[in-house]
Image: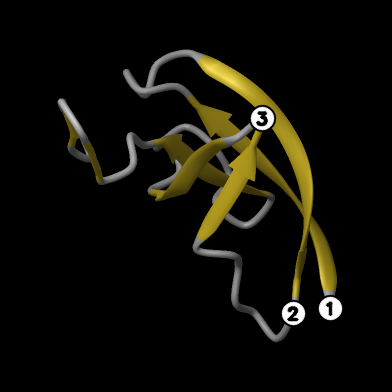
Amino acid sequence: MIAARAILFGLDRRVIVGAVRVVVAEGDAPKIIMFDGEPFLQMPVPPAWDAKAVLAYGQERPYRADDGLLEVAS
């Protein structure tokens, strides 16, 4: 197990929303991070960054269908 830094990007993938520490067990990073009630999914690390030192996650809109509301993942 190791601790890694995960950078969380907003919906446009250009603005950093936050950074969190995650525990990576057996080389498998979490596929989703919930932060402030919002889902963030794994994404490729920006090219100029060291992919071994940091993980990248992008904010997603969840698939949801309520009365009068339909959301889709972007």
Label of residue 1 in the image: 1
Where, by quadrant of the figure, is residue 61 drawn? top left
- Residue at 45% in and 22% down: 10
Task: Give the alpha-carbon distance from disc 3 to disc 2, as whole Å.
Answer: 23 Å
Q: Quadrant of the N terminus?
A: bottom right
Disc 2 to disc 1, how far (Cα)? 4 Å
Residue 24 position within the rendered picture, expressed as x and y whole percent measured from the top left: 73, 70
Residue 36 tag number: 3
The residue depicted at 60 percent of the width and 77 percent of the height is: 28
Q: Nearer the viewer, mark 1 or mark 3?
A: 3
The residue carrying pointer 2 sits among few (fewer than 14), some (14 to 19) or many (20 or more) residues within 10 Å by Cα, namely few
Q: Earlier in the sequence, mark 2 or mark 1?
A: 1
- Percent x, y for residue 30? 59, 65
Asked whether, in this view, residue 25 is left or right of residue 10, the answer is right
- Circles 2 and 1 in contact, beta carbons < 8 Å: yes
Please give the count of numbered marks on the rendered protein.
3
Amino acid tagged 1: Met
Q: x, y percentage for residue 48?
A: 47, 32
Label of residue 39 in the image: none
How far is the residue under mark 1 from the one under mark 3?
25 Å
Q: Residue at x 56, y 18 (%)?
A: 16
Element class at badge 1: loop
Q: Which residue is mark 2?
A: 25
Identified at 62% across, 35% down, the residue is 7
- Badge 1 density bin: few <14, some 14–19, many ≥20, Cα 10 Å: few
Q: Quadrant of the C terminus?
A: top left
Which numbered disc flags the more N-terminal residue, 1 or 3?
A: 1
Tag 3, which secondary structure? loop
